[in-house]
Image (cartoon, rainbow, N blue to C red):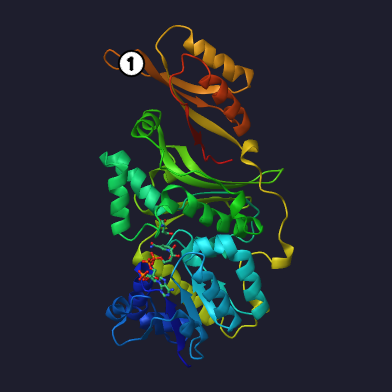
Amino acid sequence: MKPIKVGLLGIGTVGGGTFRVLRRNQEEIARRAGRAIGIAMVADTDLDKARAAVGDFARVSADAWEVVGHPDIDIVVELIGGTGIARELVLKAIENGKQVVTANKALLATHGNEIFAAAQRRGVSVAFEAAVAGGVPIIKALREGLSGNRIEWIAGIINGTSNFILSEMRAKGKAFGDVLKEAQALGYAEADPTFDIEGIDAAHKLTILAAIGFGIPMQLSACYTEGIARLTREDIRYAEELGYRIKLLGVAKRTAQGFELRVHPTLIPAKRLIANVEGVMNAILVKGDAVGQTMYYGPGAGAEPTASAIVADLVDVTRMHTVDPRHRVPHLAFQPDLLSNLPILPMDEVETAYYLRLRVDDRPGVLADITRILADLAISIDAMVQKEPGEGEQQVDIVMLTHLTREKHIKAAIERIESLPVVRAKVTRIRLEALGAS
Ligand code: NDP
Ligand code: HSE
């Protein structure tokens, strides 16, 4: 059978990895796909870099539009990133009848509804396994492997850069900025690393997972997003002393009133498997009503782990090339005309437990004032530790863990606690998830 010809847009970290993996494993890949898959054209703004990466094995162009319009190209792989030119190129490729593979979660979380609708109309596929959790085949697992389940919740470490930073800070005491630079040098971070450390990249991925898990449209703007940039070493240490690890977690949960969609630093009991996921590794826990909890684990970023997912998509798309589009797996798992319109809940209505750290004057009665405020708002305390004051210090840290309460109640409590004259700094609040069997 005629080989499938791929046009690659962007040969940076992931594009370079994809080119190498596809060439190195070409025989096995052809045996799986039923025909050879080769990269015929590569577009990159840096022609020298592109030529150095592909040698004589593919035609190189500075013009990505040439690739998406070229009649010889069957599949366009978009690895430029961002939501600007990438969106235009992907939509043009679809209009031209090309199959598309992308690792661009920002693009899909922001413009996925438009892109999938265009692909559906044109009868082409847009595959995106690499967009969530790098090399971990979570899209396939959630969309196909778990399709007999009603998905109850998804909780995942889905940003490799943040997890790498938190791991290195906790285990080796390294400084935030130094580890971020390492993550950039290793090719883990986004072009703009604030996407990683402010939780935006994780919010993109969670938006995609929630769409597939629950059969809802992409709703990035409704995702509560808080990153790791303001976490302190003290909190990481105190959490550890209490038997917890802090991870940047994406949580999507079904409730009777609607869906929770949130990304934030989270205390997780250290005995849970997911709390021990370190470095650039990602892990996603999925709770289905039939199967119970399942966990998917592997490298969440980097050239070849991400290429592994891109090439898997290329094989899938090649196998489906001649299949009637109506018989393909729907992009977002559910039939596009049967999506749920249950709302995403406002963050104030979300129920979770909390870690609170308070800097207070070291004198009698302080604790009573604080616990009275919590009791007034029906917030019950699960554990509390008062740290010893440092040499000559008049102030101490009090660390508390609460039972489940609503976000709006903890916010009200914090406001009242911070207005007490004995409270000397802003209260630190980190959410806590037990991630137990329920
Ligand atoms: P890089 O920045 O390393 O690669 C992007 C490449 O695209 C660069 O070579 C860039 O060239 C080129 N480029 C920019 N604009 C154009 C254009 N108009 N036409 C052609 N080429 C262009 O990014 P990554 O490889 O890290 O990421 C690519 C995508 O994969 C992103 O969407 C990212 O979010 C996603 N992703 C990345 C992962 C990772 O581990 N790095 C993992 C999973 C997904 P120049 O450098 O000259 O600007
Ligand atoms: N910057 C992303 C991360 C790349 O660190 O997880 C993988 O999507």
Q: Secondary structure at mark 1?
A: loop
Relative height, residue 97 to residue 284 (above, below)? below
Residue 204 image position (x, y, % from top left)? 52, 56
Above-or-below relation of 250 to 232? below
Please determine whether, in this image, residue 373 is positioned above or below residue 188. above
Q: Is residue 345 left or right of residue 191?
A: right
Relative to the observer, which residue lies in front, 220 or 236?
220
Residue appearing at x 37%, y 35% in the figure: 232
Q: Name the residue beneath numbered marker 1.
A: 389
Say whether residue 295 is visible. Answer: no
Q: Position of residue 184 (x, y in %)?
A: 32, 56
Residue 248 point in image, percent of width and height: 45, 45
Ligand 1, seen in the image, is in the quarter at: bottom left
Q: Residue furthest top?
A: 364
* 116 vs 325, nearest the viewer: 116
- Mark 1 is surrounded, within 10 Å at the Cα level, by few (under 14), some (14 to 19) or many (20 or more) other residues, namely few
Q: Is mark 1 within 8 Å of ligand 2?
A: no
User: Residue 176 falls in which quadrant of the image?
Assistant: top left
The quadrant holding residue 38 is: bottom left
Q: What number of labels is visible?
A: 1
Which one is nearer the viewer's eye here, 147 or 24?
A: 24
From this view, report whether residue 415 is shown above or below residue 136: above
Res 134 seen here: yes
Residue 358 x, y percent position in the rendering = 45, 22
Please name the amino acid that badge 1 sits on: Pro
Q: For the C terminus, which image quadrant?
A: top right
